[in-house]
Amino acid sequence: MLHKLIQILLLGIFLAVSCSEPNSTVSSAEQVLFAEHIAPIIHQNCTKCHNPNGAAPFSLVSYDDIAPKAKLIAYVTEKRLMPPWPADPSYTHFANETYLTDEQIMLIKRWSEEGCLAGDTAALVQPEIVEKTWSKTKPDLIVKIPEPIKVPGNNSDLFLVVKVPFELPKDTIIRAIEFVPGNKRLVHHVNTHIVQFEPNKKRSLHEGKYLVNQDQTKSTQIHKELGLLNDDGSYAPMTPSVSNYLPGAQFSFYPDEIGGFRIGKKNAFYLNDMHFGPSAIEQKDSSYYKIYYGTKEPKRPVKEFQIGTLGLAPVEPALVVPANEMKTFHIKFNVPSDISIVNIVPHMHLIGKRFWAYAIKPSGDTIRLIRINDWDFRWQYFYMPKTMLKIPRGSTIYVEGDFDNRASNPNNPFSPPRVIAEREGSMKTTDEMFQLILSYVSYQKGDEFISLE
Ligand code: HEC
């Protein structure tokens, strides 16, 4: 990982020369101008993270922010490193996708090569810099992380599982839950579940630890250490994936009638896989949740199933990647009833390289799900289809994944490479996982036409 950072830094220095000398042979009619052509692309696709309060380490708002980085911007857009969107847009499109078209990438490149001409910057409308991550709708309840989380200044990624207990005066219908990061530069991604206790089965929500380090705790011990078991040692029911966060990902409500659930008085958020990016100095994070209540009884709760590691269908062959090898694995699953997919979540760790999922209908037709040609563990997106995606009963879902355990992979956590495997469902980042998680509702006629945008 350190390799990658150094690579990026060197690249930054190498490309940090500003714009090329203007090329006088280009006629003014053809000139690419910042104000007219480039600002709209950057403001629409980059500024939501690249602003003074955003997740990215520098701003891309004004001409003076952008022009000195023109070559680097041309490079990262051409390589499709930015904006981060790992899914291959030539395979499937999603409601929440952000990527640049080939024409936009060309324009940026030309602008940088033609000397970064400004154009009429005075006429530029300043972009509205809202992190679109959270809505402006007023929440019914705010629940904070009990204590600020300390992130050490050791330049390494930190992966935690965190418990956030909360009590309600009565049974309540929840329409949506939104995660708001405290320290946007640090919080990288979070996947939240809710543990729901029956009041007579749990005395105190505050026993046990508030957080454990995911890389140092056996997954079978996590609930116990966090005090999340019932008083008799049994597991309390958990509603999965009630909220997911990733920088730049837009928070959204599902369409009416879809989603929503009822919870009782005693609950705890279970922040699975809370990832903090590396920091050179010790910092703190106080993230919180906004909860939106519903008024109508939830009709079509969103359910989820996972296949692969810890899931309903195994990884084949067993997920063991020998040192210095690149290896392909498969998952195969038969869909037992008609379902409508609302979210597709591929999951691998550091040495994941390629992820490809599709379904074959009983008729033999293929339903494309997702293809990621260059997996990046830092961008663990939840991919929402543009409309609800029907998978008929009897279809088979196929997942194929490559893992690259060679020294040439800059994300390899070990040097020299060591055998890397899936171990008892260990969530350690240096162990591997290969999973496809699908959020769905039972199919109803007409779902294919319900937009998720
Ligand atoms: C989802 C949030 C997000 C969006 C959208 C985004 N960036 Fe970034 N960008 C980041 C973060 C975070 C980093 C820091 C490095 C990293 O984590 O990859 C970064 C790093 C960069 C870098 C430095 C890369 C390097 O190798 O040194 C450049 C240049 C950049 N972004 C340009 C852009 C451009 C241009 C766009 C729009 C076309 C864009 N970014 C959109 C979050 C974003």
Image (cartoon, rainbow, N blue to C red):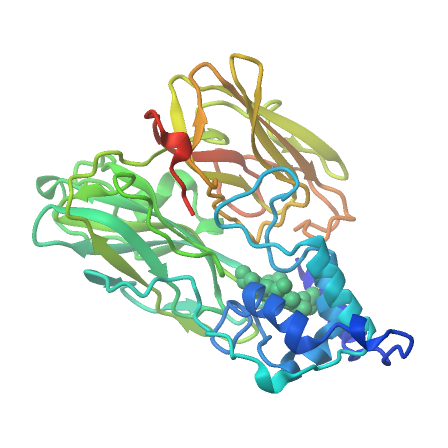
Residue 422 visible to an observer of this rendering: yes
Dividing the image into 4 quarters, which one contains the N terminus? Answer: bottom right
State the residue in front, 178 or 282.
178
Residue 258 occupies quadrant: top left
State the residue in front, 392 or 35.
35
Q: Residue furthest bottom?
A: 122
Tell me which residue sits at (54%, 70%) in the image: 47
Where does residue 277 sit, x and y in percent of width and height?
Answer: 53, 63
Tell me which residue sits at (41%, 43%) in the image: 452
Indicate left or right for 386 with 61 as reference.
left
Where does residue 290 sit, x and y in percent of width and height?
Answer: 27, 60
Where does residue 433 sit, x and y in percent of width and height?
Answer: 54, 37
State the residue in front, 81 or 413.
81
Residue 222 occupies quadrant: top left
Tell me which residue sits at (65%, 51%) in the image: 413
Q: Residue furthest right?
A: 25
Determine whether 271 is above or below 320 in the image.
below
Q: Quarter of the picture for ligand 1?
A: bottom right
Indicate left or right for 243 with 115 as reference.
left
